[in-house]
Image: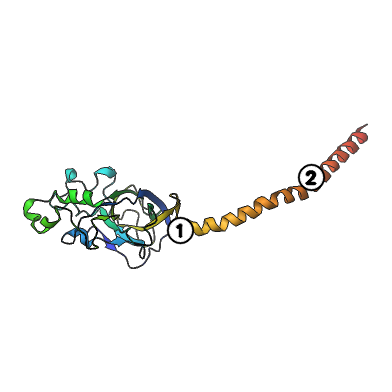
Amino acid sequence: MGPKVFLNHPTSEVIANTEIINFLAAEESNVDFSSTTVDSWPMLNYKNNQGHWNVDPALLDTPLQQVCESEIGIDPANPFLCPHELWVALDLDDENWMSYSKFTLRLSWPASSPADFFLEIYNPQAILTRLSRLPRQSAIDDASITTPHLSRTGSSTTRLKYARIRVVDTGIRTPTPDLPASATQAIPFVLILEQLYLGILPASLLPTVCFLIPVLSCAALATPWILSYLDHFIKQARQELRDFSTAQEKKEH
């Protein structure tokens, strides 16, 4: 079974769990991976900033940082071939994103799928280092990338990043009519790439914030008038309580 399956439609389950990683879109030396498996990885960019995938989780109790590492049995002949992880290219070089220096990658998955995810961000040089683990006879076709050179966009630098998503099983699944609790299945998840406004605010939250600002401003302006209006009734209620208490005392005497 391959390491990933791309879905053409969103998962129908309720998304309840989330992992987030924020990162800096710094310029890095570029590497042309067109002759390698890296070039076939799915990509998120300005026009297509969301994707849906399924990934098989590693066994229960597997340390997240050891998932898909060679020391636990992954074939070093291909450092990217593992059924428990997904690699995604993050294209930040679109002119619509060039004015933003910070981005966020958000991963969400259903509560009915007990799993832990581990997100990491790599630059091209880090990917090149992982490719260098290939045996010499397997790297002949990739020899042209051992020295960074001009990319296909004609630039020696890039803001392109790569996300590594690893997943491990964490327990018994919530049974559903179509799936018994004892069954195992790939974990569906949604991955969203967004720019951060002011370095802290995800783009998807901007409409909400823009809506709340005038609402809260109006509320703040109206608060003194509301308090003044209610003050009359508060004083009246206090007076009625005092009158009632005085009347009760007179009856007792």
Mark 1 — residue? Answer: 204
Q: As rendered, which of 172 and 67 lies closer to the eye?
A: 67
Q: Residue furthest bottom?
A: 8
Tell me which amino acid carries mark 1. Ser
Count of numbered circles on the image = 2
Q: Secondary structure at mark 1?
A: helix
- The quadrant the N terminus occupies is bottom left
- The quadrant the C terminus occupies is top right
> Which quarter of the picture shows residue 86?
bottom left
Q: Residue furthest top?
A: 253
Q: Residue at x 65, y 55 (%)?
A: 218
In the rendered view, would you say 215 is above or below 48?
above
Q: Secondary structure at mark 2?
A: helix
Mark 2 — residue? Answer: 234
The answer to whether one can see residue 62 in this image is no
Tell me the CA gap for discs 2 and 1. 43 Å
Where is residue 252 drawn, in percent x and y?
A: 91, 33
Where is residue 136 drawn, in percent x and y?
A: 7, 51
Q: Is residue 220 left or right of residue 100?
A: right
Where is residue 23 drawn, in percent x and y?
A: 35, 49
Mark 2 neighbour density, 10 Å: few (under 14) some (14–19) many (20 or more): few
Mark 1 neighbour density, 10 Å: few (under 14) some (14–19) many (20 or more): few
- 2 or 1: tag closer to the N-terminus: 1
Q: Residue furthest left?
A: 137
Q: Residue at x 78, y 46 (%)?
A: 231
> Which quarter of the picture shows residue 89?
bottom left
Q: As rendered, which of 74 and 26 lies closer to the eye?
A: 26
